[in-house]
Amino acid sequence: MMNNATTEKLHLLRMPGMAEEFNRQLTTPANSDLSFEHRVRSMVDHEITLRDSKRLQVLLRRAMLPQSASVEDIDYRAQRGLDKAEVQSLLTLDWIRNRNNLVMTGPTGTGKSWLACALANQACRQGMACHFVRVPILMENLATARATGGLHSRLQQLKRFDLLILDDWGIEPIPKRVQSDLLELIDSRAGVCSFLITSQMPMNLWHDLFDNKTVADALMDRVVHSSYHVELSGESLRKTQGVGRKGLRKKQNT
């Protein structure tokens, strides 16, 4: 009865991991030979592990990643000029901690979205909040939010993510009605959080996506000129496995 009461109290304290390990120790005869300190440490460790696992599940759910990509699955043997050392530098996620941005460009099917998901998955493992959204869908969301008076709330929601992935940038022109809203989103995150942008369109053509050149200039200044750039190449990865790229470099203001 006392053991049941202890388990119930641990659950009331919202420590299910400790309760689970406590019960395991009671039903495992070998644990009786362990010291008190060792048994308590085991309970605490199990609680931490369970909390970390639940937090990761929440982060991955909120990230809304369309692909189950993992950095362990990157195929460095693919003939795409993939530099393992440079990829490893991205996997440290220091560029997110330093509030820098990452732009991935390349033809369709070369693995931009997959690699973005792998990086986001890695970020979630390290406790960072991420969110994946296709740019056409984001444009519709911003337009709807403005029409219903919820734009400020939506921008605040997106600002909470350490990494916001904008997929398929430039797949279609940015609608005029949301260009200023997009700039407001980017401006609210500049120097505070990070973007990861994937695009089939070369960066030197992004300016043409906007008919408002003032907005285009401001956006390029905030996102492009201080971003790291990964250029992917090779055949479509929908036919072959692996991820390839031509080089990693950081764009500097000129």
Image (cartoon, rainbow, N blue to C red):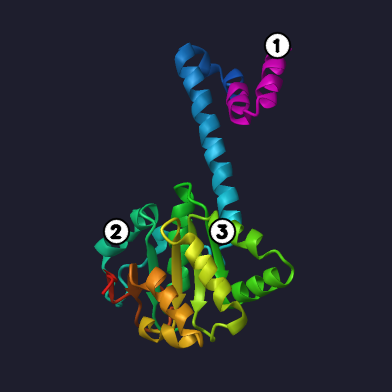
Sequence-earlier tag: 2 or 3: 3
In the rendered image, the vertical position of residue 22 relative to residue 180, given as above or below = above
- At mark 3, the secondary structure is helix
Q: Which mark is residue 2?
A: 1
- Proximity of marks 1 and 3: CB atoms separated by less than 8 Å: no
C-alpha separation, residue under disc 1 versus residue under disc 2? 53 Å
Q: Where is mark 3, residue-wise?
A: 63
Q: Amino acid at mark 1?
A: Met
Sequence-earlier tag: 1 or 2: 1
Q: Position of residue 187 (x, y in %)?
A: 48, 65
Can you say which quadrant of the picture contains the N terminus?
Answer: top right
C-alpha separation, residue under disc 1 versus residue under disc 3? 42 Å
Most extreme residue toward the front is 214
Q: Amino acid at mark 2?
A: Ser
The answer to whether residue 127 is seen in the rendering is: yes
- Proximity of marks 1 and 2: CB atoms separated by less than 8 Å: no
What is the crowding at mark 1: few (fewer than 14 residues within 10 Å), some, or many (at least 20)? few
145 displayed left or right of 211: right
What is the crowding at mark 2: few (fewer than 14 residues within 10 Å), some, or many (at least 20)? few
Magenta part, dominant SS: helix
Q: Position of residue 93 (x, y in %)?
A: 37, 55
Q: Which dot, 1 or 3, sits closer to the camera?
A: 3
Q: Where is mark 2, residue-wise?
A: 89
What is the crowding at mark 3: few (fewer than 14 residues within 10 Å), some, or many (at least 20)? many
Q: Nearer the viewer, residue 219 or 107?
A: 219
Task: Look at the image and say whether residue 20 sits in the magenta stretch.
Answer: yes
Tell me the magenta residue range. Answer: 1-23
